[in-house]
Image: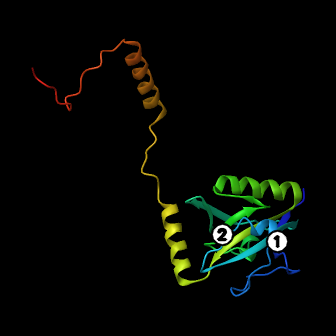
Amino acid sequence: MSERLIIGIPIEEGGPVTAIPNEKQTDIPADRERLLQRRSGFSYHLVRIELKQNGIKLGLGIKHYQNRVLVSRTQVGSLSAAVLSIGDRLIDVNGVVVSHKDAAKQLLLDALQNNAVVTCLVERPESLEAKSWMNNAMVAASMKSPFIIAPSDVVSIAKRQQEKMRSGGVKVQASILVRRRTP
């Protein structure tokens, strides 16, 4: 059984990198450029992740916030850490726009398993304002939903009760919260 290694290589360069310099804007092909809505304070990069032998993990954690897929974690020494930073936004995976973390994860895994390579269009915050927005987005994405899912037995009891009420088997009492007009 062979082990695999994922390494990140910016497309216009030829070798591995540990970071893409902030002042450098990666040349982005026209078909991918049309997917962008450039925002002030952000830089845009096209990164490539390629599978090789050795078994180093991808080490990537992503979250979604307001229809954006955000990099929430990169494992030290992992392949994603070579080209991605916490707070980066994945705009597309192999030219397919992503707005939910599950779709992005599936596209990444499919591309790496089937083709051993994947490219991602990345938006990176550079200005203080952009970094502040991204930090706020990461905090908001981490907050738990206020909704609580009821246990399955409670759900089944509620469904049975609804069916009884619909079929006329249970008399529905008028609410005490509604004002009634008296004649």
Q: What residue is rendered at 60% in x and 79% in y?
A: 40
Q: Which residue is mark 2?
A: 37
Measuring from the top left, give residue 179's x and y in whole percent: 17, 30
Considering the image in quadrants, where does the N terminus appear? bottom right
Number of residues whose C-alpha sits closer than 10 Å to that of mark 2, classed few (under 14), some (14–19) or many (20 or more): few
Q: Amino acid at mark 2?
A: Gln
Residue 100's place in the image compared with 83, above or below, is above
Which one is in front, 173 or 156?
A: 173
Q: What residue is rendered at 40% in x and 17% in y?
A: 166
Residue 44's place in the image compared with 61, above or below, is below
Which one is in front, 119 or 97?
A: 97
Q: Quadrant of residue 111?
A: bottom right
Measuring from the top left, give residue 80's x and y in whole percent: 73, 70
Q: Quadrant of residue 98?
A: bottom right
Q: Which residue is mark 1?
A: 29
The Cα atoms of the two marked residues, 1 and 2, are separated by 14 Å
Q: What residue is rendered at 74% in x and 85% in y?
A: 24
Sequence order check: which comes first, mark 1 or mark 2?
Answer: 1
Which one is in front, 150 or 90?
A: 90
Q: Amino acid at mark 1?
A: Pro
Measuring from the top left, give residue 22's x and y in whole percent: 68, 85
Measuring from the top left, give residue 31's x and y in whole percent: 81, 65
Q: What residue is rendered at 80% in x and 78% in y?
A: 27
Q: Are the residues tagged 1 and 2 within 8 Å (C-beta)?
A: no
